[in-house]
Image (cartoon, rainbow, N blue to C red):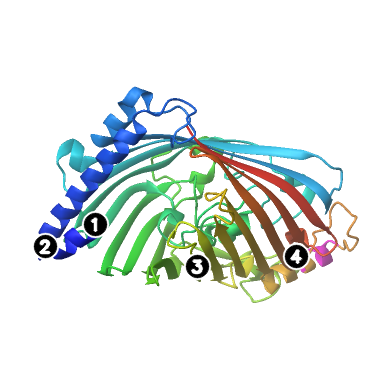
Amino acid sequence: MPYLQIFRDSAVSTPAARRKTLNLIGGFTALGLANCVQAAAAFDSQSPWMLGDWNGTRTELAQKGYDFKLDYTGEMGSNLHGGYDDDRTARYSDQFGLGTHLDLQKILGWDDAEFQLTITKRSGNNISNDRINDPRVGGFTSAQEVWGRGQTTRLTQMWYQQKFLDQKLDIKAGRFGEGEDFNSFPCDFQNLAFCGSQVGNWAGGIWYNWPVSQWALRVKYHLSPEVYAQIGAYEQNPSNLDKDNGFKLSGSGTQGSVVPVELVWTPKFNGLPGEYRAGYYYSSAKASDVYKDSNGQSAALSGEAYRSSSSKHGVWLGIQQQVSSVASDNSRGLSLFANGTMHDKKTNAIDNYVQAGLVYKGLFDARAKDDIGFAMARVHVNPAYRKNAEASNQARAVFDYDNPAYLPPQDTEYSAELYYGVHLTNWLTVRPNLQYIRHPGGVNEVDDALIGGIKVQSSF
């Protein structure tokens, strides 16, 4: 009899009984998987790990609550046409992530408790920095999302999570980034505009995404099986971004805190999963105006200091919904997504951002685990930020774009990406992609760019 039918027909009327039944089902499932995976040798295409199951040791450790991971992401980008500098070349950047997840219920007998520790190492260069974007102002999107936040080794996760009230209340504390829980989004695309928490991409001065961590607390409460609300408090400390502070644990340099709140709905329509997010963030740290001085005039023209605001804020919306499947296989089919953010016009260079796209998994029967994705994004520059660049040029009497001292005013940048993900093995996926960027960095004088990329994701 199917597990679901057993669960429905049995006298499982209390939350505790339901949990015991689910744990029993999970135990049988894990045992079955263990027997299957145990035989996996190194480089076995069916194994989830390149190095195999370590003669069964890895599965045995996982059953005892010790899960170890070593993941790799590598990204190549080449400027095929256009951009700030059309001298063709290629750049490569990558990241190693070494982590362990501990099930403290299995290890110590602590109900619904877990611990995560992750260290990351980033290295390499980004084609966007000197070929696609004008170096005088930089860009907004990045053709290689894995590049950034300092090419260094960092403590990326160190947190303890505990659930209460029959798992309705979930509390997480330690060091981690906002994007792990708030405004979360997958990262299969290579362009930054379609990867990860987008608030951190456009308000990056206060919202630190992976691989940066800070002291944080997140509280989540399930209002129903499909709906939960959460609130967090994150240390706003710019020194955490410094290349030499990858393992900094002290709070020195803290300027305030970022408080995000979010409501998340995870329904199923005709059995197909969806996720809908709406959130707001508030920063308690002081922030500088992007244009005006304390008298309300252009600071670039007056020579006075930019006026200070007591806070900073913004909102976001996110949608992901699978809309089709192949026969009865819900692991294949079409999914649609869209994201949008809006930010404080007084203090943020980007005032709004929108993107939308689609992913189809298992387009071909012979390649049921492959996926294809396409997305487009628009990043809009705050008009006050643009006026500040114009005023700065006016103050220095520099009006020629070719003058090295000229500060190009920025407006709107458009990005698009098409990729095909080749699922070579269960531990290796390669995603060749083409990216098109109109007005890179929002600078109209920069030629539209075509970028060829390859993203490699592997688990050792």
Q: Nearer the viewer, mark 4 or mark 3?
A: 3
Residue denoted by label 3: 324
Residue 395 shown in magenta = yes
> Where does the magenta region start and end?
391-396
Which label belongs to residue 2? 1
Q: Nearer the viewer, mark 2 or mark 4?
A: 2
Instruction: Return the disc, 2 or 3, that comes first in the chain's sequence.
Output: 2
Asked whether, in this view, residue 101 is left or right of residue 288, the answer is left
Tags 4 and 1 in contact by the CB under 8 Å rule? no
Query: Marks 1 and 2: which is nearer the front?
Result: 1
Measuring from the top left, give residue 459's x and y in whole percent.
48, 36
The alpha-carbon separation of the residues under discs 4 and 1 comes to 59 Å
- The reply to whether discs 1 and 3 touch (Cβ–Cβ < 8 Å) is no
Task: Identify the disc placed on residue 12.
Answer: 2
Q: Quadrant of residue 293?
A: bottom right
Point out the tag, 1 or 3, that comes first from the N-terminus: 1
The chief SS type of the magenta part is helix
For the residues marked 1 and 2, what is the alpha-carbon distance in whole angstroms? 16 Å
